[in-house]
Amino acid sequence: MTRTDANFPAETATRRPMAWRLFGPTPIMEGEDITLYDDLLTRISTAVKPKDILEDIWVREDVDLVWEIFRLRRLKWTLLVASAEEGLVKVLAPFIQGVPEQKELAHAWFARKPSAIKRVKKILASAGLSEDAILAQTLSIKLDDIERIDRMIAIKEARRNVILSEIDRHREMLGRSLRRAVQDVEDGQFEVIENTSAKGDKAR
């Protein structure tokens, strides 16, 4: 569930400038630290230095996307860790007869019981394996889920890159408009000087 500013003390919500709070609630989920989000927002906005409301909007969207990318990467690893018991059961299959016995040892290992950890290490060593074998089996089991998460990350990264390109394009257009405006002003001043000079010549 997304946490809104109403879920936090008033001083936490008001740390963000009013311009940012106009864009709605932050994408913070239960268990996430909103101060880290605020720090990310501050650091990105300081680096980009948005020039107008459009760039404010793009920066806020970029920050939200970066936050979600970090979350997905974190959850991908958490999924592997949480599924390691299932992966270990597959690793133990050639060495221990009976699925209940495999699951019992894997469960004790997952609970970090010293005797189970020691036994698993001994079994793996006897086959010339390390605990990477557990991670490899876990990855194999959860590969479809991991690929889906990776696709979600790729989509968000692509959106983030589009936003950064939009900011660059917007600034280039502003730069061209500013150069045209300056040129128009300079041309206008030159015409005034020319006209003034011409009137002075006629007067003489």
Image (cartoon, grey):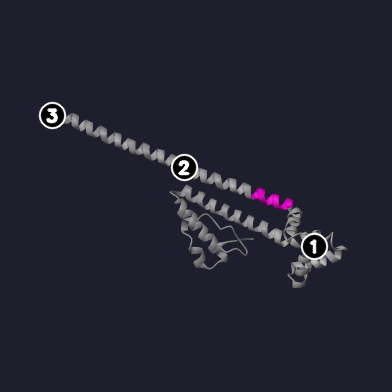
Secondary structure, mark 2, is: helix
Residue at the left extreme, as displayed? 204
Q: In this view, does 129 lie to the left or right of 25?
A: right
* Residue type at tag 2: His
Which residue is more in the foreground, 69 or 194?
69
In the rendered image, which residue does mark 1 sit on? 126
* Residue 161 vertical position relative to residue 73 in the rendered view, above or below: above
- Callout 2 touching callout 3 (CB < 8 Å): no
User: Residue at coordinates 41% horizontally, 38% vertically from top-left?
Assistant: 176
Q: Which mark is residue 25?
A: none
- Helix, strand or loop at label 1? It is helix
Q: Earlier in the sequence, mark 2 or mark 3?
A: 2
Quadrant in the picture for the N terminus: bottom right
Q: Give the range drawn in magenta.
A: 143-152
The amino acid type found where label 1 is placed reads Ser
- In this view of the protein, which residue sits in the foreground, 118 or 172? 118
Which quarter of the image is occupied by the C terminus?
A: top left
**In percent of the image, x 48 and y 41: which residue is there?**
169
* Residue 191 shown in magenta: no
The disc label shown at residue 203, or none: 3
Q: Residue 170 carries which label?
A: 2
CA neighbours of label 3 inside 10 A, class few (<14), some (14 to 19), many (20+): few
Front position among marks 1 and 3:
1
Return the x and y of residue 54 as percentages of the image width and height.
48, 47
Q: Which amino acid does label 3 sit on?
A: Ala
Q: Residue at x 53, y 46 (%)?
A: 163
Q: Who comes first in sequence, dot 1 or dot 3?
A: 1
Q: Where is residue 166 in the image (x, y as percent from the top left)?
A: 51, 43
Mark with earlier residue (1, 2): 1
The secondary structure type at the circle numbered 3 is: helix
Label 1: how many residues lie within 10 Å, few (<14), some (14-19) or many (20+)?
few
Residue 98 placement, left or right of 56: right
